[in-house]
Image (spheres, grey):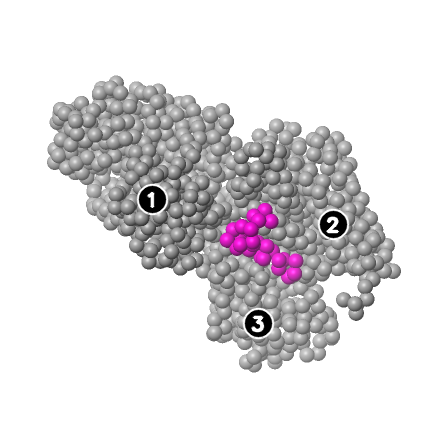
Amino acid sequence: MPYAAPLKEFRFLLETVAPIGELAALTHFAEATPDTVQAILEETAKFASEVLDPLNWPGDREGARRHDDGSVSTPSGFKAAYETFRAIGGMGLPMPPEFGGLGMPRSVATLTDEMLHASCMSFGLMPMLTQGAIEALLIAGSDELKRTYVEKMVSGEWAGTMNLTEPQAGSDLALVKTRAERAPDGTYRLFGTKIYITYGEHDWTENIIHLVLARTPDAPEGVKGISLFVVPKFLVNADGSVGARNDVRCVSLEHKLGIHGSPTAVMQYGDHGGAVGYLVGEENRGLEYMFIMMNLARFGVGLQGIGIAERAYQRAAAFARERLQSRDVADPKGPTVPIIRHPDVRRMLLRMRAQTEAARALAMATAHAFDLAEAHPDAAIRKANQAFVDLMIPVVKGWSTEMAQDVTYQGIQVHGGMGYVEETGAAQYYRDARITTIYEGTTAIQANDLIGRKMAREGGVTAKALIETMRAFVAGLESASHAHLVAARRRLAQGIDALERGVDWNLAHWKTELRACYAGSVPMVKLFGIVCGAWALARVAKASAERLDAGDADRAFHEAKLATLRFYVDTMIPEAIAAAEVITDGAEGTLALDEAAF
Amino acid sequence: MRCLVIAEHDNQSLKAATLNVVSAAAAIGGEIHVLVAGENAAGAAQAAASVAGVAKVLHADGPAHAHRLPENAAAQVVANAAGYTHILAPATAYGKALAPRVAALLDVAQVSDILKVVDADTFVRPIYAGNAYATVKSSDGVKVITVRGTAFAAAATTGGSATIETVAAVADTGTTRFVSAEIVKSERPELTAARIVVTGGRGLGSGENYQKIIIPLADKLGAAIGASRAAVDAGYVPNDYQVGQTGKIVAPDLYVAVGVSGAIQHLAGMKDSKVIVAINKDPDAPIFSVADYGLVADLFEAVPELTAKL
Amino acid sequence: MKVLVPVKRVVDYNVKVRVKSDNTGVDIANVKMSMNPFCEIAVEEAVRLKEKGIATEIVAVSAGVAQCQETLRNAMAIGADRGILIETDAELQPLAVAKLLKAVVEREQPRLVILGKQAIDDDANQTGQMLAALLGWGQATFASKVEIDGGVARVTCEVDGGLETVLVNLPAIVTTDLRLNEPRYATLPNIMKAKKKPLETVKPVDLGVDVTPRLTVLRVEEPPKRQGGIKVPDVATLIEKLRNEAKVI
């Protein structure tokens, strides 16, 4: 069952929660007219379905391989697919035109990224990491660094990687040990080991540009002593051509639970005299730059969760329509029916679909805010949107990836035994999805970011403002006549109240019971996710109700939106209410057991 | 009513598709004439004359028709079209190149690939790759039609005694020149493109048995060969033979499953085949639930017998 | 040399169409529409001719509703230089399309017209041949290879059981088969550039063409469902059924 990008839904999101027409009116995004955007989405969808999707399962079985000489090959067909991707110009889609990009808004890139991850997450990682490296250079790189590297990375001619983790430095980057020694010519020599380097080595591009966190010899301890360096696989000559091999090698690849097609490398720097590195920005400000870039990277991992959830849903729904087992419970003497007839299979499929759509709608609302924060002429609007983005990043990352665990789990369950064997593909989604709650910051790291940096630090101003915005939306449903919207109103109000209880408790106890606040941090991500997802989904459904009233011909599409919202609020809001209770009442139990007793 | 059937032939004999077209013409009714346009095509004209139901053969012989170029053939048809209510050609590469040209020259619509004659003006034809059948009625005075051969039985090659009338061959239009023809040797067709597919399953017991049982049947049928996942995993044949969810998806006209139990992932790869035959000794094998024709038998006896009798 | 490429907007080939319950047609409301795949091959071939320096200008033309503009934009994103939309809401059958195209050919004077061999909606496989007849041009149908040499096109055509090569004097009509080429993906920058290429709209009446349909669709229905399978007692019966009932051997 091939992947079919939900283009109709994409288009509708671009008319509702992320109105592309509004962006095209801004000079910055003047090229992003609805018809151009539609053509871009359709072409990317074609590439995803025709090229990437067929590679996903064979790529999982074949996996990436490292050879004795340190070179790495990816599964058959991946490199050719990348050639096509590059020829299409996919890498430069959201990148600035002055470096050869297309300057498309984040809301468009959000959808194209989802399609890449949905059809083949192992493949989608490479552009994701390269784009992350480009962002870092754009944020902090000198003009010379930008001139040397960015254009070739935007064109996809060269790849990029992010080298943060070391064996002793995972979530805590303060422990980074890789050394960067100053050389007389102003460059640096790097020495150390980096692990979990996604696409750290491969044969797709002529050069690979590693962005590496390291410490200079006299750097202060901890996070304030980390600098960011560019370390190209091949040094770049003055004329821009590729020169000598740098002292950086892939020494092994990890054996992983999922994303087998994506090479996860252990990179060794400086075994032969030092890897030549170039400082990005200023010394000791590396983590600061990283965190700016991290917003996008985390958002991108959230999109992986949404993409793989969509794919798992499509496969499960197709299976449930075809698999004949048992009779309709209400017609025990009737014929054997497709399992989609069974109420619990419907429940599972709706749970998959509703969570995926809610997470996508929320991601798109966030992407739209990204775009307004970047391009709106009014500084106050830019600021408000940036605050919303900052608040939502840990939610989109944390919640979309956690819901992907549930969705891919249900995907196997719908298949029954056929899902547990690898052949249907359902199992691969479950395995591939598993990494998304871990890399670019585990869910707990997102949760810490949410309650600390994004809430407590500003006294919850943005969170409270969001709650008011959502309340105003619910108030606007007063006049709704569609039965599902009427029912959703009450549930949404309950959900928002629960969110407020959780937020208020957390803010009130921040100064006095910090460990208790952190004990409820991951439930806070879930609470935000479910409630904000409901709000985003309801905004879409409200637009659907309006379209139906206006006589829109595609009734089936809009009625599905309303029914999906109804299922979501009736079955997920209770989980949000429970999460709020865990925040307000769960800390004592969480912290009670003595450490020694574990 | 009078039908003109455009014969497809090789100068000596008629191509089989012509016989199906004669039957379609018979279903329309009225007198049936056959146009044989060729060079030194007396043999083909004679063959047409003896087809049951044919009243007259128009034989146009000349160098313009040496390679049956549609430009010249269409001109010939139009030159002889007077008095005919229906002009029919086979829906082959030849007929499809020719018939629209004739229709345009006569300023009438063309009805492609008919499956059924409802009445003299009304025909059933497939649209959307056969996912729907349309019943269409023509308002034109002359109906130009191409006929799907498999939808009509072949007319008998004997029993007719039509007169053969020689008509003047048209001159070469000169727009097009034949260079060469290269008829492909009948190598084994590719799995996903084949009209007939024979697959073997674990019931075969070994790779040697696969060679011994499946290959001769496939050769006889001009079929592509495939295998179930179980047979691939058991090492009987390489992985690229696999038909199924994770292998190739096929939808041939005829699918013959030999010793295949019919696991759901196999069915996913072949259930859109037009006709499915299953040969398996287990009467409860799931493959029988999708098979049009099931034969409960020991494959080691039944398949060689089938191969021999085909 | 100017090349004209007619392109048709059809239901996307991945969409499994459903017959309407009132049997008046298939339900194509709200389904994804795309360029007919054979037309895509035609556009690709024209672009390759341009890349070889043989074609100098590629004009894409489409006939139908206003949304056919999207199909023309797609053709221009692949590499056509400009587009002509013959806009009409009327049902268009192949003969009418051929007449419309003839009028465009007379205006544009291309040396070569490349069309898809058939559209995947009505599966008629007629327009190219009809256009050739109306123009009095030679035709090379179901092409799997096209070479232009001066005033002649050397075309390898797919015929039953093999290939046939013909030389067609230009101007000529070529219709494409699947193996002719593998169409490229439109690049995203070219999609953006396509928006700025000229697209002209004309009406059938401007071209002096009567597009009244000659065929009436009385009914559209699902193909007969597979009958419940039967068990046959022996090999002889199996062969008999396959020959005479299923007619597959």
Instruction: Check chain identity for marks 2 and 1: say if they share one.
Output: no
> What's the distance in space between the residues labelled 2 and 3, CA to CA?
37 Å
Q: Nearer the viewer, residue A361 or C66?
A: A361
**SS for callout 3:** strand
**SS for callout 1:** strand
Crowding around mark 1 (Cα neighbors within 10 Å: few <14, some 14 to 19, many 20+) is: many
Closer to viewer: mark 2 or mark 1: 1
* Rendered location of residue A104, percent (x, y): 58, 50
Q: What range is drawn magenta here?
A: A413-439
Chain identity of mark 2: A
The answer to whether residue C103 is left or right of residue A194 is left
To which residue does mark 2 refer?
A: A528
Crowding around mark 3 (Cα neighbors within 10 Å: few <14, some 14 to 19, many 20+) is: many
Closer to viewer: mark 1 or mark 3: 1
* Rendered location of residue B157, percent (x, y): 19, 31
* Amino acid of disc 1: Ile
To which residue does mark 1 refer?
A: B196
Instruction: Check chain identity for marks 2 and 3: say if they share one.
Output: yes
**SS for callout 2:** helix
